[in-house]
Structure formats: structure tokens, C-alpha cells
Image (cartoon, rainbow, N blue to C red):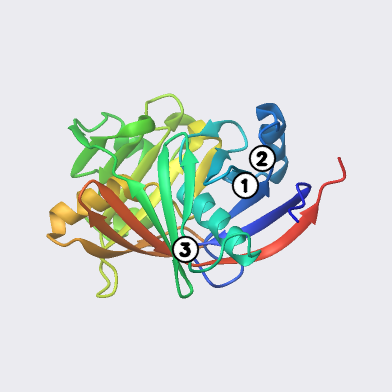
Amino acid sequence: MINKKTIYQVDSFTDEPFKGNPAGVMIVDKQTESDWMQNIALEMNLSETAFIIPQKDYFEIRYFTPTKEVPLCGHATLASAHILYELGIVKAEDKILFKALGGDLTIKKEGDWIVMNFPTYPLTEIEKPHDFIDTIGFEPIETYSSLYDWIIAVAQTEEDILKAKPDFEKMKTNGLGHLMITAKSNSKNTDFVLRCFAPSSGINEDPVTGSAHCALIPLWSGKLGKAEMNSFQLSKRTGQLKVKLIQDRVEIKGKAITIFKAELKI
């Protein structure tokens, strides 16, 4: 039986505790109000908390940052699938269909890995914002815009990504409030690196960002001439992803580990 007063915290895109990206996961029902979910997300104070609403043949899924609802989230999708498989609500050999505001998401399990199928995000090359170097700390060689107000900046080197020191307050006012920065990796085992910032959504730096790869996989596939790649997010917690471009979809593989579960007293 599903306990609708239980909330889980899961570290996504890692198999080590306290690495990857933590997400909250709750299984609720269709009567659950949006304001209540937003308050729970604020209480959890994680980059995203996901709410799973079981339906007959699929699961509705909604994602909330501490300040707003968002249409799509990779690490919270991974965390949610992990909980459904771990609790035995979905058998390991069965697929999961999530219906999110950002599209339909098909999930399957391959051994210890969870494989997510997401849509690609379109990219439009734009002029570099005039105060980018003052706001972020390096001069990009290319900049793009994409869905949901995302800006993608390509750096010359991995060192630029590591040393970037964003001014989060300035980002909120100059159009860089949702920013991915990325570069080709120096490592033989990794194709590209990234960091991801969303101060306009209440997240200064996101530890590991699955949904960012909806834009980055097509970008780097074109640059590197390959469909299958390894990505590494250079946040403090770090995160490793196996990714693949499949026509107009992207495949994102990751592992996850449950850190705790808690019972609501309200």
C-alpha cells in the first residue's frame, strides 16, 4: 500500500551518498493542491521536489523548485523512477511512462542504471550578452538560447567552467537567470563538462542537471560527431551521466540512491 504521507530524499546521478543531485519524491493523489506541493518543496529546500500522481496506465509527475513549478527535471525524474522501482510499485522489467508538463517521458531499468528518454530542446545561436564576462567570469566562444528561457554558453576550456564565479543577483536582471555553461572535456573518459545555474528559479547552482542535456546532447553530438557520450557536471557534488542522441530524442542514463524517508505530521 502507498503511504501518501511519506516523502523520500534521493541522490540522483550517483551511487554514492551525498554526491549527485538530491531530489524530494512524494506519491500523492489528484486532489493534492498545487499550493500544498509548492509549500512542501519550499520546506524541503532542494533544487526540485517531484510529486507522482498514479493513473491507470501511467504516472503524472510535477516538479517544484522552492519558488515555482517547472515543466521538466531530469534528476527528479530519475529519483522518482528509482523510488517506484525500489518500492516494487513498478517491476524492474517494466517501463514507466511519466506525463509531465514538459512532455511524455519513458523510463526503463538496465541493471543498476535507470534510462530516461527525453525530448531534445531546439537551439538558436545568439549574440553574446554584453556583460557576460563581468557576470560569469569568462568570455564564451558561442552562445545559444533554448526553451524555458535557457541560455547556453560554450567556453574555450574546461578551466573556464571550473573557475566561473557567477554574480547571481546580476544574473536575475540581465537575462542570464537560467544559464548552462559547457566546454569540451580534458578527460579521455568524458566528452563534455558543464555547470548549470538558475537563480531566477531559486536555484543558484544545480548540482547535476539531467534536463540540461536535452539541449547539450544535440549541441555536443554535432560538435564531436558522435551520438553516444559521457557528460560530467563540475559542481561541488559532481555527477556523471551517460547520454545518447536518438533522432529528436535524448537518452540519459544515471544511478540513484535513497538517502532517507520521512513521515509528514500534517
Q: Say which residue label 2 marks.
A: 41
Q: Element type at marker 2?
A: helix
Residue at disc 3, secondary structure: loop
| Residue 165 in sight in this render | no
Residue kind at label 3, given as amino acid type: Thr
Residue 119, by quadrant, is top left
Q: Are marks 2 and 1 in contact (CB under 8 Å)?
A: yes
Residue 46 got which mark?
1
Relative side of 1 to 147, left or right: right
Left/right of residue 195 with respect to residue 60 in the rendered view: left
Q: CA distance from mark 2 to mark 1?
A: 7 Å
In this view, the mark in front (2 or 1): 2
Query: As displayed, is residue 212 above or below residue 62?
Result: below
Q: Could you classify mark 3 by the number of other residues whose Cα lies within 10 Å: few (under 14), some (14-19), or many (20 or more)?
A: some
Q: Position of residue 130 (x, y in %)?
A: 26, 28
Residue 232: percent from the left, percent from the top? Answer: 37, 63
Q: Secondary structure at mark 1?
A: loop
Residue sitting at x 31%, y 30%: 131
262 up-or-down from 113: above or below: above
Between the residue at mark 2 and the residue at mark 3, the CA separation in whole angstroms equals 22 Å
